[in-house]
Structure formats: C-alpha cells, structure tokens
Image: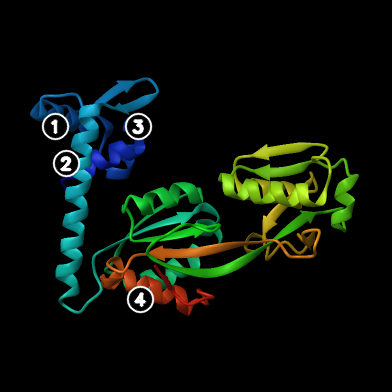
Amino acid sequence: MQVSEMEMLITLSEELNMRRAAERLFVSQPALSQRLVAIERRWATKLFIRSSRGLSITPQGEKVIGLAKEMNRKELELKSELTAEEGAVYGTLRIAVASIMGQYWLPRVLKRFVERYPHVRVQLVTGWSSEMMRHMLEEHFHIGIIRGNPDWKGVKERLFSDPLYLVDSELTSLEQLRKTERPFIQFKSDSTYYQEILEWWQDRFSSPPARTLVVDQIETCKQMALHGIGFAILPESTIHEASEVMQIPLKTSSGKILKRDTWILSTESMLELKQVQAFWDIVKEEGGSQSDGIRN
C-alpha cells in the first residue's frame, strides 16, 4: 500500500521524529527517509532539518505542509460528502479529546460508535484541553471534547459537570489540610485546571501545602494517592472504583461544590457530515449533554 505524499508530510510534521512517523505510516524508517529526500528534491528545497533530537520544519516546509493539510482536508471532506449521498455512514471522523476524557470516558462511547458504524475511519488525538482547543480553532478536527469553559463560536453542549474530590487514605475532612504534613500529589495539566485548584486553595487556606509532589499523568497521581503516599485532588469521573480511600468533595468557603465541566464542540457545517452527526447522537444516547445546544 502506497503512503500518499500528503499523509507522509502531515505525519512527519506532527511527530517531528522519523521513527515514530514511520511506525504511524506502517513503513520502514529508511523507506520513509528516501521518500522524504525524493519529495525535497522535487520541491528543490529542504522541508525538514534533521538532527539527533529529531526534525525541525523549515520556513519552506511550513508552506508545503500547509498546502498538504489543506489538500488533505478538502479530499476527506469531498469523500465524506460523496459517501453521504449514498445514504450510508462512511468517511473519516476526527476527534480531539482532553486526556482525562480519552482515558476514562471516551472508550465506552467510541466502542459503541465503531460497532454501529464500522465503515467510519476514526482519527483521534488526545492532550491538554488547551491543545485540543487549538486543534478545533485551526479546523483540524470535526469534534472536540474539552474540559473547563471553552470560548467557542460554533455548536457547544455541556456533557456533564465533574465534581472535584480530595482523595486520601488518612484525611477525613478538608479542614485537616490546614495542618497536615502529607504531600499534595499533583499531575501536570493545562493552566485552567491549575488555576481553578489554586483559586480554591487560596479561598480556603492562608498558606500553600506543606509539601508537593508533581507527576506527569493523572493515573500516576491517582495510584500514588490510593497507595497512601499523599493526598490528591481528582475529578469524580476518575475515581468511581476507588472505594478504598476517602473521597471528600471540594467546597469553597461559601459551601459551593467545586466542579469542572466537560463540553462537546463542533460546527454547523461539520454536523452536516453523517459520521459527525452520528457520533454526536451516540454521545447523547450515552447520557451526554446536560443542556441545549449553544449556537452562537
């Protein structure tokens, strides 16, 4: 199977690593390198700079890759429109999902979708909500699943509100946080999540946690809390099965429960594609949106 020039350039620009790009494209690394050399020769310019750290895109490469992305987007949309006219659900569905939702919520929904619509090709990217929002604003994806309160001009529905909990094997109340020496285990996330936690802490307490541990993944944070290493603040959606530890809802000084919303985003034009509307409908069937669509 031949890998198209567009797909190859786009994958290289996303990975910026020959080995990882070759794995995604199911070709050998030497073959991919040869293809890239041939393309650069045809364009008579360097598209990427190679180094021991990976690839860097040249200014000329940015222009060529931009053209490749635009051509690829138009090709996929044309294929989707043509197959939609036949009455069946085909085409490609591109979803950008916040990491937490990709780990704890999406698998159940996606399993139902692919079972019902096996001819749809799903392209998925996960990461911080801020990164996924950038993908949506750049119109790289059909649907976004975003945490927080995204500023979005298209179709936007709240899926659910996720209460935040203090999770610990020893602490039994929020007031004990004032004096505890137990470390606060944090996971790396986007700035809006950190800001919400910081504002909550400053609202309740006059001094920062005595000790902190920072880990790279929410699951690592959760497991460390479950094993009694310290306390963590985690969304309810991640701790349904963590009955062996205390789960105390976070409340402000006025008694309001702290929550983090999850939204599904798209546009009117994207929802005209059958595969996009089909996924949107399945999300609703799974008990998704808690409000009517906001169409700005």
Q: CA distance from mark 1 to mark 4?
A: 40 Å
Going by the image, does 223 lie left or right of 211? left
In the rendered structure, which disc, 3 or 1, sits on the residue that comes first in sequence?
3
SS assignment at label 3: loop
The label on residue 17 is: 3
Q: Quadrant of residue 46?
A: top left
Q: Amino acid at mark 1?
A: Ile
In the rendered structure, which disc, 3 or 4, sits on the residue that comes first in sequence?
3
2 and 1 marks in contact (CB < 8 Å): yes
Q: Amino acid at mark 4?
A: Arg
Report the residue that reaches farthest toward the left.
42
Q: CA distance from mark 2 to mark 1?
A: 8 Å
The label on residue 39 is: 1
Going by the image, does 166 lie left or right of 289? right
The label on residue 5 is: 2
Q: Residues within 10 Å of mark 2 (few under 14, many from 20)?
A: few
Residue at the location (87% across, 58% down)?
Answer: 173
Residue at the location (19% across, 31% down)?
Answer: 36
Q: Which residue is mark 4?
A: 116
**Of 106 and 111, the residue lying toward us:** 106
Colour style of the rendered protein structure: rainbow
Q: Quadrant of residue 282?
A: bottom left
Going by the image, does 83 lie left or right of 206? left
In the rendered structure, which disc, 2 or 3, sits on the residue that comes first in sequence?
2
Q: Position of residue 296 (x, y in %)?
A: 39, 67
Q: Amino acid at mark 3?
A: Asn
